[in-house]
Image (spheres, coloured by chain):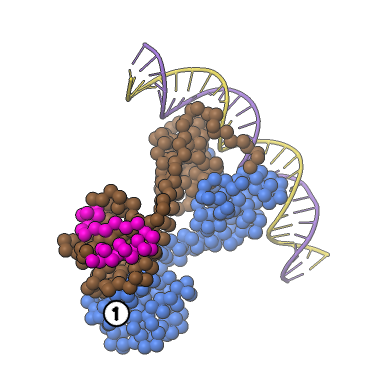
Chain colours: A blue, B brown, C purple, D yellow
DNA sequence: GGTCAACCTATACGCAGGTATGGATGGCGC
DNA sequence: GCGCCATCCATACCTGCGTATAGGTTGACC
């Protein structure tokens, strides 16, 4: 605690950015895709009354083309659309790494379709006619899940942002150091002198904002950037 | 690796057990619960032809009372039983921390029931009459999932087994050391001298079979035994 | 009462980690 | 060309870590 004073403002060698963690502002955004205008209208008024921001779309293409929609915390998706299957839309979202929680809706669904939808990661599967409380409960769950995902991703992004500032050599050293190798062993593996390794190590510790090796190891786990040549524990030979 | 020779056979101070990792032997065991004898019989012959070991039960109670059944890699469960709801059985399994992958079956299911079953963690939901290929595919998925869970749990159990051999003091030290504190700081927190901390530290490193601090940190993450007084990274003050 | 495990301490030595000082090289952009 | 950056190295010094040696105190168990 008082033993070592850490000064990081006086050094001019490396500019270390402090990444801002993205915070969700205001009420959550819910998107609705349904080809039935009556459904869209009913959903919009119901969700607005529950204090959500709402955007509605008649087709998946409209949704995918909308810049605002990428911030959605929940997607209410009709599985029975004119042009495309709602389950295909789920797949399309997955392919584009869009991780919005999906609530599926249907008028005439069957069990295999439900199973496919749920296995594809849907939060819930609502059948028409909708009970308002069911819709709000499902949307509530989806928004809550989205919040958890966002905060988890915020942590990961912060680490990635810092990692991006490392030079290639510093990443090499970080990988081997977090694998449990001593400076001498790292030096041998990278064909360097031990002093050089120490310098890189000190630099990357500062750049990663790591106060200890334990910190760095946990960051490496987050990054998945560890040298995975061994089973799970134990220093790499 | 040749720099430091680690000898752990000659010391007589601590007996450190090497935990055996449980390995699944032979063909996987599949359990079937259905009140219809015809279904049980058909399932049994189908699954045996696919080289699974099979146990069938008419009621959930029979299954829960069977000692052999706890090793099951898959449970085929009828959701429409005489006495108890199949979904309640899922809940009962969860309450008893039985983590067997479940495949639900039904003759007259509806979508809300399917959603409940899938949200409760079912691998699949089959509708009667069954297509053989669907059954085998679902069971195959369940068994594969079980295999992944077993290997993951094997790793965790190994660490827990080692951790169980630590004395209370060694656990204190491990928590603070893996939180990133220096020996001196650990000593201050526990009101000890630094030498004592070093001894505990050396002992626990040997007992945990950790070759480096990085190893120990990863084990602590597995255990969830870290001092979680800080946000996520950064040494505890 | 003896034995053992767990716990604690002091001193001392050697090695590993970290930093500072003081260089050197090569690539890139203005 | 010049500055900037990443990379590399050597020497030196201090701190931290790990172990060995050589004790001590409790409390449980036979």
Residue A9 visible somewhere in the drawing: no
Q: Residue at x 58, y 36 (%)?
A: B6
Horizontally, residue B209 falls left or right of residue B161, namely right
Magenta-colored stretch includes residue B57 = yes
- The vertical placement of B203 against D28, above or below, is below
Q: Which residue is mark 1?
A: A109
Q: Looking at the picture, tell me which residue is in the foreground, B108 or A26.
A: B108
- Residue A118 among those drawn in magenta: no
At x 41% / y 53%, what residue is drawn? B26
On screen, residue B153 versus residue B199, left or right, reads: left
- The magenta-colored residue range is B38-64
Asked which quadrant contains residue A140, the reply is bottom left
- Residue B169 visible? The answer is yes
Task: Give the quadrant of residue A182.
Answer: top right
| Left-right relation of A171 to A93 | right
x then y, percent, for residue A184: 66, 43
How would you classify the magenta stretch by its main secondary structure? helix
Question: Along the horizontal axis of the image, is C28 left or right of A222?
Answer: right
Q: Which residue corresponds to the image point at 61% horizontal and 58% vertical from the top-left?
A: A166
Residue A144: horizontal and vertical position, in percent?
34, 66
The front one of A83 and B191 is A83
Query: Disc 1 is attached to a residue of which chain?
Result: A
- Label 1, residues with CA under 10 Å away: few <14, some 14-19, many ≥20: some
Q: Nearer the viewer, residue A97 or A8?
A: A97
Q: Quadrant of residue B79?
A: bottom left
Residue at 43% in and 70% down:
A99
């Amino acid at each position: 605690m008082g033993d070592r004073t850490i000064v990081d403002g006086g050094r001019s060698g490396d500019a270390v950015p402090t990444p801002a963690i993205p915070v969700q502002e205001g009420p959550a955004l819910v998107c609705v895709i349904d080809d039935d205008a009556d459904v869209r209208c009913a959903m919009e008024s119901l969700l607005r009354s529950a204090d959500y921001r709402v955007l509605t779309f008649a087709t998946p293409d409209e949704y995918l083309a909308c810049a605002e929609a990428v911030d959605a915390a929940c997607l209410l998706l009709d599985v029975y659309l004119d042009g495309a299957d709602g389950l295909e839309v789920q797949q399309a979202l997955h392919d584009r790494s869009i991780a919005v929680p999906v609530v599926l809706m249907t008028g005439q669904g069957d069990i295999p379709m439900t199973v496919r939808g749920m296995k594809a990661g849907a939060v819930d599967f609502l059948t028409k006619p909708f009970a308002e409380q069911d819709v709000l409960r499902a949307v509530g769950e989806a928004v809550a899940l989205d919040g958890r995902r966002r905060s988890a991703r915020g942590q990961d992004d912060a680490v990635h942002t810092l990692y991006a500032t490392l030079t290639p050599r510093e990443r090499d050293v970080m990988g081997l150091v977090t694998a449990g190798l001593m400076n001498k062993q790292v030096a041998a593996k990278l064909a360097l002198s031990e002093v050089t390794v120490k310098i890189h190590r000190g630099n990357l510790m500062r750049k990663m904002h790591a106060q200890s090796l334990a910190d760095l190891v946990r960051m490496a786990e987050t990054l998945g950037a560890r040298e995975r040549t061994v089973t799970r524990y134990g220093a790499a030979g």
